[in-house]
Amino acid sequence: MKIGFIGLGNMGGPMAANLAAAGHEVTGFDVAGTVAEGVRPAQSAAEAARGAEVVITMLPNGDILRKVAEKIVPTMAQSAVLLDCSTVDVASARAVGEMAEGAGLGALDAPVSGGVGGAQGGTLTFMVGGSDAAFAMAKPLFDVMGQKAVHCGPAGSGQAAKICNNMILGATMIVTCEAFALADKLGLSREALFDVASTSSGQSWSLTSYCPAPGVGPQSPADNGYAPGFAADLMLKDLRLAQQAAEQADADTPLGRAAMELYARFVEQEDGKGRDFTAMLPRFETRGRGA
């Protein structure tokens, strides 16, 4: 398949390289001049999109996505699919979908879960919104770049699924870190807490798959000095997107809001910037109840 790929950063670069390695003809563009193995570089986003059957975007935010879409949609071939894998606000995802469909194109919003490791290993999970026909056309590409693609519904549904999932993740990670810090102060070993909670009603992905306590459970960023697998900055971005959507939908999400406020404090006022989002645990270790 002939593919245009726009945004060759930490996530997009490996995704594009995997597509090229699978035999697809990939032309890529990044404003920073980044290149990816096996990907032919283009001089502009429009050049990367021209003549492609599927154009994939992996961009930082909704404003940039809208601007890129305005440049590439007029150059894309009829019946081509615009596949956006960025994590952006639901309103931008829907607006870009409408723009593409109005030009006779297919459109999918397909944010990912799995981080840089998943992008490199081709094990991402895609949460996809858009038409059945566009999903069917992109499915072989999802199979190369990831291990699972879930068609969640019409345009915007992929972003909705991503932010709802990550709101759960942000809140459960915070309380998991709180529990380990409390166990320390109660004289309960971390291993004992893990052994009990991981097989009891307190079990969660945050505990058993991505444990914030070093030396407990499977390997995680906690065992590497909290170097980011999923940065606290990115968790804050997703929690803010969730609260933006909640406000627009008139949804009451007090724990989601509290998680966003705590990650904002951690990233913007404390030492969380550039660290994994599990670094909440050392934050709680050193704090008393009145801090």
Image (spheres, rainbow, N blue to C red):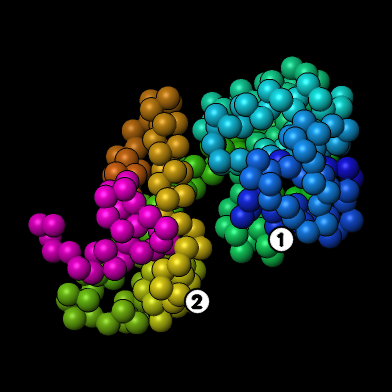
Placement of 100 over or under 29, stated as above or below: above
Image quarter of the C terminus: bottom left
The answer to which image quadrant residue 75 occupies is top right
Seen in the picture, residue 206 relative to 245 is either above or below; the reply is below
Residue sitting nearer the eye, 132 or 163 = 163
Disc 2 crowd, CA 10 A, few/some/many (<14, 14-19, 20+): some
- The residue range painted magenta reads 264-291
Give the side of residue 286 with respect to residue 267, left or right: left
Instruction: Name which residue lies at 18% across and 81% down.
Output: 187
Badge 1 density bin: few <14, some 14–19, many ≥20, Cα 10 Å: many
Residue 125 visible in the snapshot: no
Q: Quadrant of residue 22?
A: bottom right
What amino acid is found at the position of numbered circle 1 in the picture? Gly
- Residue at x-position 70% and y-position 57%: 14
268 falls in the magenta region: yes
Give the secondary structure at mark 1: loop
Residue 170 highlighted magenta (yes or no):
no
Expressed as whole percent of the image width and height from the top left, the position of residue 92 reads 57, 27
In terms of depth relative to the viewer, which is nearer, 178 or 23? 23
Q: Indicate whether 17 appears above or below 94.
A: below
Residue 81 percent across, percent down from the top left: 79, 33
Q: Position of residue 126 (x, y in %)?
A: 65, 48
Q: Residue at x 74, y 17 (%)?
A: 102
Q: Do callouts 2 and 1 mark residues in contact (Cβ within 8 Å)?
A: no
Residue type at tag 2? Gln
Which numbered disc flags the more N-terminal residue, 2 or 1?
Answer: 1
Q: Which residue is mark 2?
A: 219
Which residue is found at the position 68% from the left and 43% from the top?
30
As drawn, is 236 to the left or to the right of 280? Answer: right
Return the residue at label 1.
Answer: 122
